[in-house]
Amino acid sequence: MSTTSIITNRDRDCLACRIVSGSGLIGAGLYVAYHSKKFNKTPGKFVMSAIAGGFIFLGTSRIFDLPPFRGKFSH
């Protein structure tokens, strides 16, 4: 027996959803990039900058509906 609800059937690919989730990812990337400046060693800065870049890339691709998000939330 499957139950359907408003939450499971909502459209997760609307423009507002993409803007909110993409902005959250970009904000997380900027937060990590800002705090990566506290590292004194080069490998730590590099790793944290790579993580920040990944978050920013994912946020941008979510807002513009690019891969890896294209078609993932459609019903």
Image (cartoon, grey):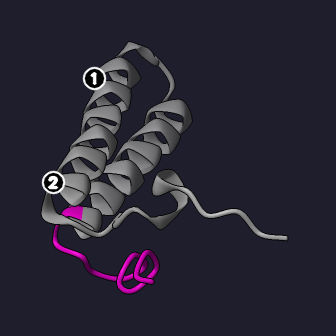
- Separation of marks 2 and 1 at Cα, in angstroms: 27 Å
Q: Residue at x 26, y 52 (%)?
A: 22
Q: What range of the chain is rendered magenta?
A: 63-75
Q: Residue at x 23, y 59 (%)?
A: 18
Q: Which residue is mark 1?
A: 34
- 74 and 30: which is toward the camera: 74
Secondary element at tag 2: helix
Residue 10 is drawn in which quadrant?
A: bottom left
Query: Crowdedness of circle 2 by 10 Å Cα count: few (<14), some, many (20+)?
Result: few
Question: Which residue appears farthest toward the top when viewing the image?
Answer: 38
Q: Going by the image, does 59 lie left or right of 40?
A: left
Above/below status of 75 relative to 6: below
Q: Going by the image, does 19 lie left or right of 55?
A: left
Question: Which residue appears farthest toward the right when viewing the image?
Answer: 1
Q: Going by the image, does 15 lie left or right of 50?
A: left
Is residue 64 covered in magenta? yes
Q: Quadrant of the N terminus?
A: bottom right
Is residue 42 covered in magenta? no
Q: Position of residue 39 (x, y in %)?
A: 46, 18
Above/below status of 74 relative to 36: below
Q: Position of residue 28 (x, y in %)?
A: 35, 34
Q: Nearer the viewer, mark 2 or mark 1?
A: 2
Q: Which three-letter amino acid code belongs to the residue tagged 2?
A: Ala
Q: Position of residue 3 (x, y in %)?
A: 70, 63
- 27 and 15: which is toward the camera: 15
Q: Which residue is mark 2?
A: 16
Residue 13 is drawn in which quadrant?
A: bottom left
